[in-house]
Amino acid sequence: MGILNVTPDSFSDGGMFVQLDAAVARGVELAQDGADLIDVGGESTRPGAVRVPVDEEQRRVVPVIRALSQSGVATSIDTMNAATARAAVEAGASIVNDVSGGLADPAMAATVADLDVDFVAMHWRAHSTQMDRLDRYEDVVAEVAAELDARVAALVAAGVPEGRIVLDPGLGFAKVTDSNWPLLARMDEWARGRRVLVGASRKRFLGAAIARRGVDAADPAAREHATTAVTTLAAAAGVWAVRVHDARAAVDAVRVVSAWHAAGFGRG
Ligand code: PMM
């Protein structure tokens, strides 16, 4: 899944793709680099970000999704708003990716059930102005598992078929640094056989892991190799998708994992 933020303020690519033609060109480029799906978002969720009015969000994303669909590029819509999810699917998006897992908008679950599309339910505790202070866990894996299970139950109760739901641990969302790693390392404990999406690309916790003399770990672009390392391990763990800024690096990593497995990994 390639990231396409049509926003002025996202942490890594903010401001680069606000113009329609630049956004569409970037989506096509990500697809040519091997992304199976382009995740189009019109509202930044970086720490501290303020909400975007829903009509402004739709003004940003709908024309991009429509143009990419017309070019044969598959898209998902990254939104917490049910109205935007509906407009995006009507414009051609095939998956709804909601960082709040349906919590932010009470109409989301029923809308997704009605649209009959896959739904990425991410672990989330609060909007971006609040989330860092909610990085409080006794046992992060058990608590994220329970909170994701509650989301699945609510979605299913609203009519979303369980098989339509993809789970995401919400790396960086109410997880500043150390809370992220157990969720990656112990994926089976919260995923329990469901499809998983991992969104680690260039995030702060990777900066913390690679920080050393000579590395500008505060620069999101400097976290690219660490991102590829996560993609490799996530692919080996069998995730359904990774959400990344650099699709080519991710596809290379997935191909290496495939070759490794095809050659008999685990059999010896
Ligand atoms: N992270 C961001 C935005 N959307 N969606 C999912 N499903 N998972 C994530 O981890 C995630 C997301 C963070 O912002 P970015 O678009 O600038 O990477």
Image: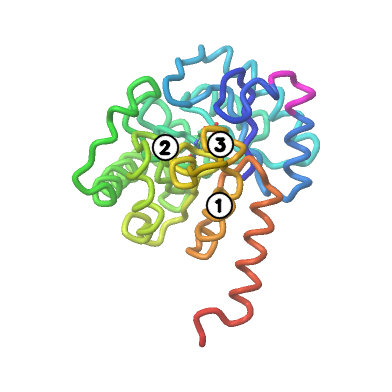
Label 1 secondary element: strand
Query: Quick one: which residue is furthest to the left in this view?
Result: 138
Q: Is residue 14 left or right of residue 233?
A: right
Mark 1 vs mark 3, CA separation in Å: 28 Å
Secondary element type, mark 2: loop
Q: Amino acid at mark 2?
A: Gly
For label 2, being within 8 Å of ligand 1 is answered yes
Single out the mark in the foreground, 1 or 3: 3
Decide whether the magenta segment is chiefly helix, strand or loop. helix
In percent of width and height, residue 47 lies at 43, 25
Quarter of image, res 144:
top left
In terms of depth relative to the viewer, which is nearer, 177 or 209? Answer: 209
Viewer-proximal residue among 209 and 113: 209
The stretch of residues the image draws in magenta is 18-23
Vertical side of 260 occupied by 194: above or below: above
Q: What residue is pinned by disc 1?
A: 241
Q: Is residue 39 above or below residue 210?
A: above
Quadrant placement of the N terminus: top right
Label 2, on which residue?
Answer: 172
